[in-house]
Image (spheres, grey):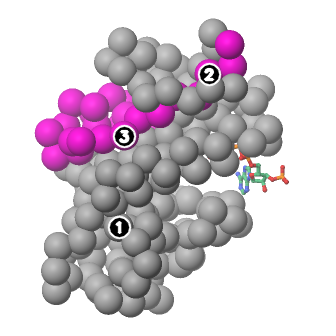
């Protein structure tokens, strides 16, 4: 398997992975909107390939923390998708690790995700709300809103509410 940055030419492959993984169109539509959303730039979009077949996709978009005492370089991981035939084979994990590596290189300090509370902690994510870092909208269960730091010492030094890209800033995107 190889992981490459997704270009504009890969958009239909990205959307197809999202549709197959989620079994509906909503998340693919969000991805399409994020690609065209100036407030979501610069985004990081990675595709996992098994030969000529796209099997997984991950996207990270910039965000900021309202109420924080200083500017923190923040990113949101959403969405992550692996096609049903490739699930539970480590593709999701490799996409997360590669994405976090690239984000750290580009200077990101905190990464947030709304996702399965049993899955993301294995990569270093922890519940964000007890750390004083709220989601853009109320989330349920609260443990599904998680954060990890890419620069040590940031967690604990900032508190506030995460504000995300415009296209993601609708309550329907914040239901786990
Ligand atoms: C969730 C998802 C991205 C994981 O990708 P993956 O490549 O299958 O995951 P990996 O192979 O890296 O890791 C496998 C582990 O993930 C965990 N896992 C997979 N799906 C899970 C789910 N829905 N809930 C909780 N844990 C899950 C399992 O613990 C599994 O470990 P096991 O095989 O030892 O049981 C993928 O299953 C997927 O695309 N699902 C549908 C779309 C989705 O729900 N995306 C949102 C993620 S928040």
- Earlier in the chain: of badge 1 and badge 3, it is 3
Which residue is label 2 attached to? 49
Q: Name the residue rendered at 50%, 40% in the picture.
A: 58
Where is residue 20? Give x, y as percent.
61, 26
Residue 125 in which image quadrant: bottom right
Bounds of the magenta segment: 26-51
- Earlier in the chain: of badge 1 and badge 2, it is 2
Q: Name the residue rendered at 36%, 81% in the picture.
A: 154
Q: Does the magenta run of residues contain 35?
A: yes
Which residue is label 3 attached to? 44
Residue 98 relative to residue 8: left or right: right
Which residue is label 1 attached to? 109
State whether residue 144 is above or below residue 7.
below
Residues 84 and 97: in front is 97
Residues 171 and 72: in front is 72
Q: Name the residue rendered at 24%, 42% in the picture.
A: 42
């Amino acid at each position: 398997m190889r992981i490459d940055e997704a270009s504009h030419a890969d958009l239909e492959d990205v959307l197809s992975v999202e549709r197959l993984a989620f079994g509906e169109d909503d998340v693919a539509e969000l991805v399409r909107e994020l690609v065209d959303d100036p407030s979501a730039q610069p985004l990081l979009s990675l595709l996992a390939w098994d030969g000529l077949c796209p099997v997984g996709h991950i996207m990270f978009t910039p965000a900021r923390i309202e109420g924080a005492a200083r500017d923190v370089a923040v990113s949101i991981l959403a969405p992550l998708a692996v096609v049903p035939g490739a699930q539970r084979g480590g593709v999701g994990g490799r996409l997360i690790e590669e994405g976090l590596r690239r984000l750290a290189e580009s200077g990101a300090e905190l990464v947030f995700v709304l996702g399965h509370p049993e899955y993301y902690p294995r990569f270093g994510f922890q519940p964000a709300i007890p750390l004083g870092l709220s989601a853009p909208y109320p989330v349920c269960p609260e443990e599904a809103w998680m954060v990890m730091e890419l620069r040590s010492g940031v967690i604990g030094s900032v508190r506030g509410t995460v504000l995300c890209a415009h296209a993601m800033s609708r309550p329907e995107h914040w239901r786990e």
